[in-house]
Image (spheres, rainbow, N blue to C red):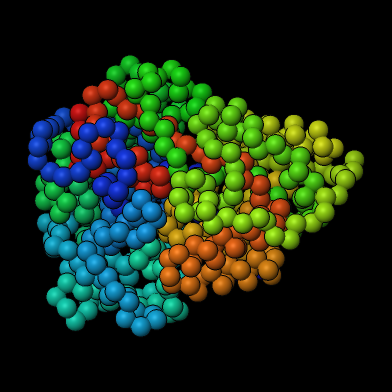
Amino acid sequence: MRSHRRPRLLAAFLLTPLTAGCFASGGGDSGGSGGKGGDGDRLRVALAFPPAENLSPYGADATLLSRLGVTEGLTGLDANGSAAPALAESWRRDGEKVWEFTLRDATFQDGSEVTPAAVADSLGQATRAKPAPAALAGVSLSAKAGSGERVVRVTTDEPDPVLPLRLSSPSLAILSAKAYKGGRTDAAGTATGPFELTKVNGATSASLDRFDDYWGGRAQASGIDARFIADGTARANALRTGELDIAEAVPVAQAASLDEGARRDTATTRTTSLLFNASSGTFKDAGLRAAARGAVDTSVFAKDVYEGYGDAGAGIYGPAVTWAEGKRSAPVGRAKATEPGGDDVVRLATYDNRPELPEAAQVVKQQLEKAGFTVKLTVREYSRLEADALDGKFDAFVLARNTLLDTGDPVAVLASDYTCDGGFNIAQLCDEDVDRAVADAEKIADTAERQDAAMAAEARILGSDAVVPLVHQRIITGVADSVQGVILDPYERALVGTGTRR
């Protein structure tokens, strides 16, 4: 029984505290205050996904807030996937269940001070949110002011060796006390980032002004005018005609319509995979999973479907997870392939929020049919598919999944997606060897050893043939010639920062 399953609307495909200095920028200086453009023009930015939860910081909309430079947490992620200072300038572990975080001198956008008590209250609010933020799945924690003037003590019910990574999640952003009044959590004017949310027009647009007292320095743009444009062609057209300065997630089919200098492609931690239902239907049979995996030629997806804006699927973690390739080992425990029969019908599904996925699913359908399977393809908007997918109503599912979005911990996605009690286990995999390997990895605190254990668990998961990685996606960001300092974040958590300017 998967007792911890809960819907996480849009979590699988959204793009995503502000660690601008850690990643490549779209040209020019990516950080700091002052200098040329200190009073620069407002940025016109288009995001691909409209708010789904009234810009709540706890769900899928958390990444919209972090990408626009509104929110940040105690920690961020550096280029190597390790926890980096954000609102906390340092931290230390005090025993197995307690961590102490030392805060930097910072101010909320409403003028109040970022104090240990305020941080403890904000984390407490997150633990009580319904549904709970994905980063807290399976974790219970409490926070209080520590003995030092700027110290916060965070205590977990069970040892959590990656708590600093967990607290980097956009869904655990720190907000002031004013954010929690009125029955909803409101990030407008209560966050700590370089840009303050001042106006929201439903799911259409939002306005942000520069927060001049930002601890990381005064942003070089005076504000942001954000539009939420779901249609990728429309985003590309608006950039090309000069209506936008930045357009995120340009579809590969539209890339050629932009000048070469206006395209920035970035390797990301997002992998598009084919998931097989390992608990019911056709692919409950491990031999048929092996046959289907063998029928899928993954080389065509990066080359043809993604038109070169991707890397051939190598594993659950792709090349943007820089440490993974040197630690990867061969899959363990694969079954012998079974010849499919005429009654082996495959109910394949995917969603159209990402325009490349239906095409990828069509290629999968053709390849499986060539191998002797009968395939029925369903394509819907993601929110109309997720519940059925989590309930195991499909035999196969093409999914684009950011492996490090929720926590930055490589083990967390394995626990969520491939264990018996995983909350996002579309593959319906329940294998005691996989569960044991993931549980062993979860206990390890040392970063390198935890990575080794994650790769050992990956080998077990791939050996189950419940997942076939198809392509490691590169995200195309459209950037006008006049714009510098766009943050090209492989974790998809940041887009604009203090150094982003026209």
- In the picture, the quarter occupied by the N terminus is bottom right
* Residue 488 makes an appearance in the image: yes
Q: How many marks on residues?
A: 0
| Outermost residue to the right | 342
Across and down, in percent, residue 191 comes to 23, 54
- In the rendered view, tell whether residue 170 sits above or below residue 46: below
Q: Quadrant of residue 142?
A: bottom left
In this rendering, position of residue 386 left or right of residue 225: right
Give me the residue at 49% from left, 62% from top.
451
Across and down, in percent, residue 70 comes to 26, 48
Q: Quadrant of residue 85?
A: bottom left
Across and down, in percent, residue 74 comes to 28, 62
* Residue 5 makes an appearance in the image: no
Residue 406 or residue 65, whichever sits in front? 406
In this rendering, position of residue 379 left or right of residue 493: right
In this rendering, position of residue 286 left or right of residue 457: right
Give me the residue at 34% from left, 61% from top.
83
- In the picture, the quarter occupied by the C terminus is top left
| Outermost residue to the front | 326
Residue 452 or residue 167, whichever sits in front? 452
Residue 392 or residue 476, whichever sits in front? 476
Give me the residue at 59% from left, 49% from top.
315
Across and down, in percent, residue 313 comes to 59, 42
Give me the residue at 47% from left, 22% from top.
254
- In the rendered view, tell whether residue 496 sits above or below residue 122: above
- In the rendered view, tell whether residue 170 sits above or below residue 35: below
